[in-house]
Image (cartoon, rainbow, N blue to C red):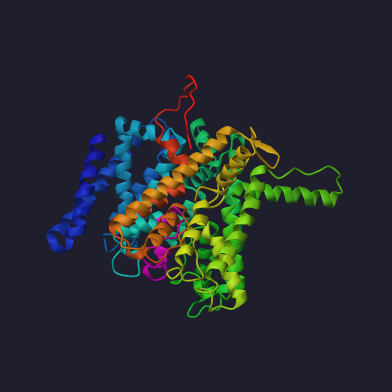
Amino acid sequence: MKVSVITALAISAISVFFSHTQALNPVIRASAGYLDYAVGLLLLMEVFAGYRKATYKWPYFKRNLISIGMAAAFFLFLLSRLTSFPVAAILGDLAPAIVIIRNTLILLGVFTKYNRLSAFLEQITIYPARTILVSFLIVILVGTTFLMMPFTTSGEHGLSFINALFTATSAVCVTGLIVVDTATAFSIYGKLIILALIQVGGLGIMILSYFLIFILRRSVSLEDKMLISYVLSERDMTKLAKSLTNIIATAFIIEGIGTALLLPGFLNMPDSGFPTTVMLAVFHSVSAFCNAGFSLFSDSLEGFRGSPYVITVLSVLIIFGGISFAVITDVRQYLAQRIKRFVSHQLHRPERISINTKVVLTTTAFLLLAGTLTVYGLEHGRTLQTQRLGTQYLSAFFQSVTLRTAGFNTIPFDSLRPVTYIAMALFMFVGGASGSTAGGVKISTLVIMFSYLSSSVRDRESVTLFKSSVPIDTVVRAFLIFLFGVSLVAIGTVLLLLFEDASSEHIIFETVSAFGTVGLSAGITQNLSVAGKIVVSVLMYLGRIGPLTVLAAASLSTKKVRAEYPRSEIAIG
């Protein structure tokens, strides 16, 4: 049936071309309809032929459930062409989405029928780092396709390809940079799609996929377990199901609590009923916890600068999302042990908090305080001067929270002092904790680097943190991540300086914001050229994937070289 699949692909391509030119000629419009029927017939032939050849029918059905479902969906789309069909109007509205399903099904058929293409896919997916890169890219492309459809926007047409690509990348990479106003440019369907992309990007497509596999009790190969253990940094593969369940449950519980807490803060919004209020609460809770920074208000959160309740709830959600699931779990277990010890009057000491948790919590607290003082010190006589003293401190604190992670703003960012942009860029470059939804080089990287420099100055042989030594391999990776981040920001800055007509501090701020997946903008994002949007999209993508994953995916060899060469002294400094 290889011929039928290839034929279906060719006919589908012609049909798509006709569908974009059907207004020119009624004959072309009719031809596009007949081509769709031909594609549907070929797809059904493919499904039934495979079913007939299968020795065991039920295993075949379970193994090809997705393909059969896609074929059935496209068959319903064909029925929607018949005006007498009961749900023709509903299916007609979903026609663009079902056309995507059709083309996806055909492409999957082509990829699985030809060994060379299948081998190519295996070479990509056999390495965990490459699988992560590809999975994020696929979700971005799917999101781009949906955002190009008319039903996702408030106007008559969908977004252009480059704007849809930029928006989808920003959502999946939980950045928050936008080229169109999320509040006004998208319909409810478009906002829900962006929300779904944020959730998938925040938790990670691999985590969600394997969680569903474990829930459905499907078997998981050793290679798949190795992949998800790489994603979770979990060495004990027997705990994968428990770790996945813990991550998903923690995320949904925190987002649910955040939604409930935000509802009272959004109830008094003008011209908004209860369904709209619920949508606002859900969207901002997910966006805050996933550190995305997308808002359904045109001015982000500037209208809530005088609302300590809303700002505090969002700040807590952002902080939780930026310290990683591992830290949240560690703290929860520690507190549970302390409570259990207190209630049962046990004398033994509870488990200690891990070194990673201590590093993340202490550094986060320090950076929050430093960021608050920096923003207030630089802007209290400028951007913040029209606000009351309490609101000034609240705004400074909230911007300190969002600087390294989320990208919401309660103050206008297009009129800051040049030195403020540079100072903020430093915080954005650091980012959040490893394993969190935040970007940047990560705070643990910064701590390890400073610890190494401190040990070198004191002429100590080992690097220590909280009375524990850090392996030299970890130190090397920390410097590698830092160098990668600096190089990427430098290249992005140079390219944007070439393509865009903006001040240097604005360009640097935009570049670091994209790399750190922060989402704050100096006001130049919506005016970027096509080349500039592509550069920023690449920065967001690489920043979300992470330097280590990018470097691991680019590695051509996994073999360790054991040969050692004679040592030589080289003059430096």
* Residue 178 lies in the magenta stretch: yes
At horizontal 47% and vertical 56% (from top left) the residue drawn is 198
Q: In the picture provided, is 153 more to the left or to the right than 172?
A: left
Q: Is residue 26 above or below residue 15?
A: below
Res. 342 in view: yes
Q: Is residue 284 above or below residue 64?
A: below
Residue 428 vs residue 327, the one in the foreground: 428
At horizontal 56% and vertical 62% (from top left) the residue drawn is 400
- Locate residue 519: give its quadrant: bottom left
What is the magenta range?
170-191
Q: In the picture provided, is 41 more to the left or to the right than 193?
A: left
Residue 356 vs residue 24, the one in the foreground: 356
Residue 490 vs residue 458, the one in the foreground: 458
Quadrant position of the N terminus in the picture: top left
x and y percentages locating residue 32 in the rendered image: 19, 55
x and y percentages locating residue 44 in the rendered image: 30, 44
* Residue 179 lies in the magenta stretch: yes
x and y percentages locating residue 225 in the rendered image: 53, 35
